[in-house]
Image (cartoon, rainbow, N blue to C red):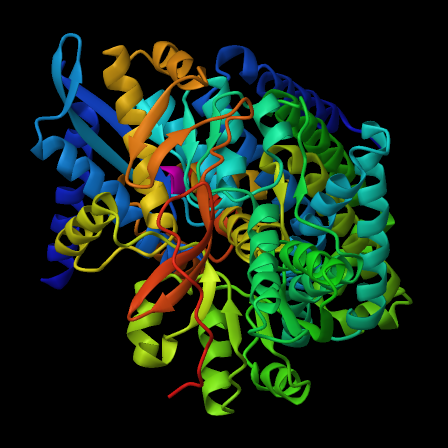
Amino acid sequence: MITLRDIRNLLLAAAALGLAALLPFYDSGYILSIATTMAMFTVLATSWALFSGPTHYISLSTAAFFGLGTFVTGLGFQTLPRGRLPLIAAGIGAVLAAVVGLVTLRLSGVYFVIFTLGLAELVRQLVTWVQNRTGQRGMYVLTSITERDIYWQLIGLAALVFLLGWLIGRSRLGFALRIIGNDETVAKHSGIDTAMAKIVLFMNSGAVAAVVGALLAPRYIYIEPSTAFAPILSFQVVIMALLGGTGRLWGPLAGVIPFTILWEFISRHAPNQTLLLLGVAFLLIVYVLPGGFVGLYDRLRRRFGAWGQ
Amino acid sequence: MKRRNLIFGAATVAMMAASITGAAAQDVIRLGAAAPKTGPLAGGADVTHWPAVRLWVHQTNEAGGLQLESGPALIELIEYDDQTNPQQAIQAAQRMATQDRVDFMVAPYSTGLNLAAAPIFSQLGYPQITGTNVTNQQPELSAQFPGMFFVLGRTGVMAEDTARVLVDLREAGEIGNRVALVNVADAFGIEMAGISRAVLEENGFEIVYQTSYPLGTQDIAPIIDGARAANPDAFIAWSYPGDTFALTDQAIIQNFAPKVFFTAVATAFPSYGGRFGAQAEGVMGMGGVNPDDPAFAAFAAAHTEFAGQGPDFWASADTYATLEILWQAIEATGSKDRAVVMEYLQDNSNSYETVLGPVQFNEMNDNERYWTVGQWQNGVFRGVASRGRDGVSDVILKDGWD
């Protein structure tokens, strides 16, 4: 059932995305390059939160899927139609996520976290092994794609992810995930196929991360495993999503924007302290903002609401 | 108390940063530089990139700056850390160009970071004279980025010359036919091993042992063990800094001393000579210099005095030379107008006097004269093979580790 409130929210979201899409007309240099980074992390963090938010399974595998996506573009951009590459990346990402999910999502807690962290390294070594066997070299993705094109593609992808998140939130699947997050045993006893629900969502975030990698490959130009699978990406996504809060669909966005601006500010004025910032942000989230900005917003609203009465 | 100090310190740093970026006097050329200060390549950049860049700025300012038509202009260096991250390299180049409004930019460090930043340099019209970008794609890259110049040389040629050194030694009857070939399983190692293998086989060498190992591997012992068991005349390793040291360590431990012992990247670092001392004698590696050339000797002395460490015997001089080239283009045109300077650089008839010797770019913006193979001889890493460079030393055979 779609209520008036839903229509209002959809319209607001569409307006915000449309506004974001106009940005390249305002500035095509510095601001666009930061905005592209923001758009990339928005997509990654939002799709990450769709899975990890309700289930509380912290996944550190974003870099694995992202790197895989860049390699799909790197290998295929000369021979395959360019429009099809993100779809292929999505397919491969989803299949990998399904395989990994089947094996590991029956694990819980820290076992899952450790496995996903290892996954990026595993995939990277596999790719390197294949390159080594075939004598394949570092790849140069030389195209005429500009930053502006990449930005628009990312905004489009963000729209898709938000829509998907909104639909999942209203579906039986979303409901099942929230139950799993609250108590997995109860969920099982209520007849929910918990493994299936988790795998479907994990496949979703894996596919999206792979598409982001495929879209960004032309921006990096030179594709090599050590940068494509850099594990810091996985941590950045988790920190941004948690900073924003995973309780609402727009939560990760509320983390990505301030974090990217802060990161840029620190890079500019204290270039040697970026890793320190990452650590401090993590501590802050854990101690001060356990629910992220979303949690803070909800708390303030509750207090505000009480005053109003 | 401590916390207050910290905050005060941070505020001071912020103010200093603000004053640096805020000042823009007329007789100043703003030069932006973004390269790794953190991340996997920070160690290499600390040896090769940063000291050479800072030394050049220091010396140029000491000498009264660059001579423009309007008079002398001092250099103001603006440094950023790209965190060895292509994303950050892109953003840093954007920031320097559009926020700090630098007049010119130093090319980043390493092939990957140079290519990530290339579209920004290109779109905004900044010359990108690269000193640490080894590639074989000069034709494609110079077509896409006409402002990108290549000083360090071609990967294919370096792999080929390494194999040629073996061919020459065999022709002279110094070594036999047996080669052990190993590589780090990474784009660089795979490519180099492939080319050198092809050249060696073409020339009738027998590859008696070949293997690869993952980047960052800790256990090198089985590789040296396997190579030693194959009893080769020559050992060629397309290695990265960490494994270059580890392979040498293991070879010494297992007393594996073939007549030719070659490790690739970082063999030319002064720290390699420092670590292994007399044992490094006869070890070959990528790069090389002519240490007897007065221009290089002066550079090395100034580098040691300024940075407290000597230059590496390969890309330090290339990095320095990229700035000499830029400087000569600016002074020749008398202008800090990028379009004018770019036009001068793109004119292939111009040549530049650098610490490497004369440099001239061909129609693919490629420098065709460079060092390819070097060897430790009496505590110095001398070039023993080059394309078009003077002062090539004779190769010596490795005579054990003691």
Q: Is residue A214 left or right of residue A91?
A: left
Span shown in magenta: A262-266
Viewer-proximal residue among A308 and A164: A164
The quarter holding residue A266 reads top left
Picture residue at 49% right of the left edge, 33% below the top: B117
User: Which residue occupies the extreme front position in the image?
Assistant: B172
The part of the image, by quadrant, that contains residue A125 is bottom right
Q: Residue at x 59, y 38 (%)?
A: A220
| Residue drawn 21% across the image and 22% down it | B29
Residue B283, above or below B22: below
| Residue A138 in picture, x, y percent from top left | 66, 48
Expressed as whole percent of the image width and height from the top left, the position of residue A116 reads 67, 66
Q: Residue furthest bottom?
A: B254
- Residue A98 among magenta residues: no
Quadrant of residue B328 in the image? top left
Quarter of the picture containing the C terminus of chain B is bottom left
Q: Main secondary structure of the magenta part?
A: helix
